[in-house]
Amino acid sequence: MNLMKLFNFKYLMQNIKKSKMAIILFLSIVPIFTALTIILNSSYYYALEFYELGLANILFMYITPFILSFSLFGYVFKKKDIDFMCSMPISRKSVFVTNTIGGIVLILISQLITFLLSWVLGAVTDTVVFTGMIWDLFLYQSLAYIFVFTVANLAMTVSGNVITQIVVTLLILFLIPATMFYYDLWQGAYYDLVDGNYTVNADYTIRSVRTYTAPSAIFGAVNSYWQYEPSVASTVKMIILSIAYILLGYFMFEKKKMENAGESFEKPNTHFLVKALTLIPFAMILAPCIDDEEWQAALFLIAIVAVYYFIYDLVTNKKHKFWKSVGMLAISLAATTAVYGAVGKIAEDADPQIEMEDIKSITIDQIAYYMYGLNYEITDKETIETLLYEGGQYSSYYLPYDSSMKDDVAITIPSDQAYRNKVRVWLTINMKNGSEKNTRIYISEAFIKEVMANTTYDVKDVGIVQYKEDVILTNEEEKALKEAINNLFFENKWLDLYEILNKNYNDVVRTYRYENHDVKRFTVPIETTSEIFEIITKAENRNTAEFTRKTKNLETYLHIDMYELNKKFDYNGDCPISVKEYVVNHKDDICNKDKDYITLILDGHKFYTNDVDTIINLIKESKEYKTYIEEGYGRYYDKYYYDIVDDMVPIETNEIIYPEATSTSVITVID
Amino acid sequence: MIKITDLNKSYGDKKVLENLNCTIKTGSVYGLIGANGAGKSTLLRIIMGIFKKDSGVIEIDGKELVDVEEIKQKLVYVPDDLFFFKNYTIKDMAIFYSKLYPNFDMDFAMNFAEKLKLNTNQKIQTFSKGMKRQAALICAISTNADYMFFDETFDGIDPVIRNYMKKVIAEQMQKKETTIIMTSHNLRELEDICDNLGLLYKGGVLFESDVDSLKTNMFKIQISLNKDFDEKDFQNYNVLSFKKTGSVATIIMKGDREGYEKVLRDMDPLILDFLPLTLEEIFIYEMEVLGYEFNEII
């Protein structure tokens, strides 16, 4: 098969010309929506994840390649279009090769436009767009679009109308991954670790399904854990399947019986078979209904299926005798329900276990909600075992919490004392066979510290993307900060970052890098090292002083952050003029993190100083402070929360509050 | 020349063409007639490569017809149900054809359209049915293809334009030895242009002949003799039909007209008129000879 001989450029150009509106839509829709994604996120100084940057690209993957296929091949569904197009002096082989190559080129052009637009917008907006990520997006989404396009083309070769083409496309794309997904769901929520003492929450085992092909990632959304990411397995599958579908489509298009245009399939039996396959989603719901003896739900579902079954014939333009259709419906539904009921039973009985010896490593994906993509891989057998047994006792998603009240302060703490000092950690268990199991565990702070302190952390060359919007670093400062953070990681000190992060997570430097097709996101508290602290606070003080100088005579709100100091003092009110003068006059002061210091927050702008007593005195001597005291504010800031916890009395409440994160301090104060 | 041998085609269980044999000479205008569903359009679609044949051989210029560009460039087809791309003008359609037919004559197409008073920049979808047919014919004729297939082509075209079209087709044939294959279920449409006719019935060519020999070999006479007479008086001649009303008989005869005229004059007739037969009449009588009711066939 000489592809170049079969490729007819003139025909392609004419074919594109006749469908120019659809083609223009195809070429522009993904770039436009991707550009919008970048622009709309530009105000958040945000590094987009792969699935976030590619959201439009991913969603349109299910539609636009099909539209492209229809634009190029849609004539095969209308008799008069066929008469015209097929009579033209171009062979069917040539038509198929030309349209397939043309479609692939159009897909690549669309993705290239998206790539270039993303790259330019990443450079001119504040959204963090990694070149590596958009390159990955270009390659992976191009493959995904080509894959869907080839599936749609293959479906076209066997279908007589567009509805049938859609149905066949969906069946080719989703029949196998849907069955795998169904199997996983029935397999139960837990994988047992060999000795039965530990269970891995298997909510996320559908990862294996999602890596079947890119479009099958949609099943991740069904399980409310949708994270679209490039996968080697998926890439290889899509390449192989695309080539296979192109070859198969080539031969089937050559033999396609054009006289069947308008009808679903040439043979009625094929129509019945495909229609029966479309009942699989219903069978997947009906089988468990019957298994659970939910007869009412089952009957309701059967009624829906019956309506669907007859509508299907109407839209696919196939007429059958009524009683024959009823009979086929009964047989089809019974067969599909029986098959998927059996699949469910097999899955249930499979009782999957994770053998310790099958585990290659464990990757810590996230700790609490603060550290993302740590790329932290544990290969030591003993550590893995200890980690899983230590943390694996609790498999439920949320810890049950109690609410209590003390001095008008509502406090929620874990009901189970054993979890009060545990941290939620997201893990990926990497199996030797290449599969992955994802789970969450609650693990003691002490243990995680110990493990991490003894493990090499392999982050290199961290790029600082953005610090707070109103803090402008000079080039020298930015260079120094980057160097400091790089040194920090090399010196294995990130454990300290973790400690500080949870105590004061507002003052952080966020750094990002794209590595191994994934965004590595680091949140570095400025208190991590003296060097970082000095760089940031100096820049921040400089900016705050400038802000204060400009607004000296205006009313400014002052908040004092005293969490780090055991001083029974708080202030949240109008900023005294004396404090403003202090800020302006001490703009070049350097704050030392190793001494006591306070943070003044003036209308959101921060000023760090070790001159704690001076500031407190300036405030206490001001008229604004007198008003503040007289009005009775500040009651909640004169104690540590721990003081409340120590002698709190649980109150009866029906409300169970689920905190978003469990960290070193497991207390959430609701004010 | 197009030679079709034992062509078969079925739509599911329904046989549409059954062992069809047919020969179309180069440079002729071949009229294919038959009732709706006789298989005329199917035959054209198979020749054009639109439908796949079940079995049989189609040869064009001595070579078996296969789905390759070089051979298909010799063929152009105007279907019964016309198709034009949405929002396309005649000029756009002409450009489309010109990209696929190397001998497409753009100047001829534009001049042709101008003579027919068709606006080449107007969207074809705004045209009347007849104008659309004209547009399709303009594009097809301008391809300069060797074989042109017109399926019920002159439907909806007014007589003046129809005659003009026929004239252009005749000129085209003179210019280049083009072979025209036209289908119709109406013999009158084909009468004044075709020089060969084939009658398609139940998937096969029931009858095939050139029009000139049909017209010269069959004739109608009105005769009255000075004595009482009946059909037996003509039993030695090839009489296809004999009808007598009063003393005048109308006879359809087949054979050598000059020979018959001499013999009939020898009978000393009171009236002897030779009347022309329409193609439809010729077919009716031919079919009757073959044992078919013409009205059932067309």
Image (cartoon, rainbow, N blue to C red):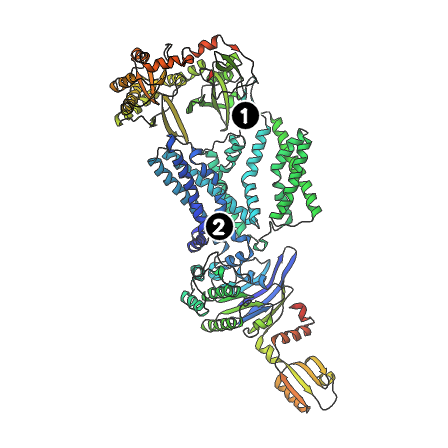
Under tag 2, what secondary structure?
Answer: helix
Q: Residue B291: give x, y in percent of width and height.
A: 70, 72
Q: Residue A521: give x, y in percent of width and height.
A: 39, 26
Q: Residue A289: give x, y in percent of width and height.
A: 65, 31
- Residue B61 makes an appearance in the image: no
Nearer the camera: disc 2 or disc 1: 2
- Residue A635 makes an appearance in the image: yes
Query: Which residue matches tag 1?
Result: A202
Q: Residue A303: give x, y in percent of width and height.
A: 67, 38
Residue in view at x 65 percent, y 45 percent: A310
Indicate the amino acid at tag 1: Ala
Q: Quadrant of residue B237?
A: bottom right
Q: Quadrant of residue B248?
A: bottom right
Q: Report whether mark 2 lies on the same chain as mark 1.
A: yes
Tag count in the figure?
2
* Chain on which label 1 sits: A
Q: Nearer the viewer, residue A643 or B207?
A: A643
Q: Nearer the viewer, residue A420 or A437?
A: A420
- A11 sits to left or right of B259: left
Indicate the amino acid at tag 2: Ser
* Chain on which label 2 sits: A
Sooner in the amino-acid sequence: mark 2 or mark 1: 2
Under tag 1, what secondary structure?
Answer: helix
Q: Which mark is residue A71?
A: 2
Task: Relative to A33, say whether A533 is above or below.
Answer: above
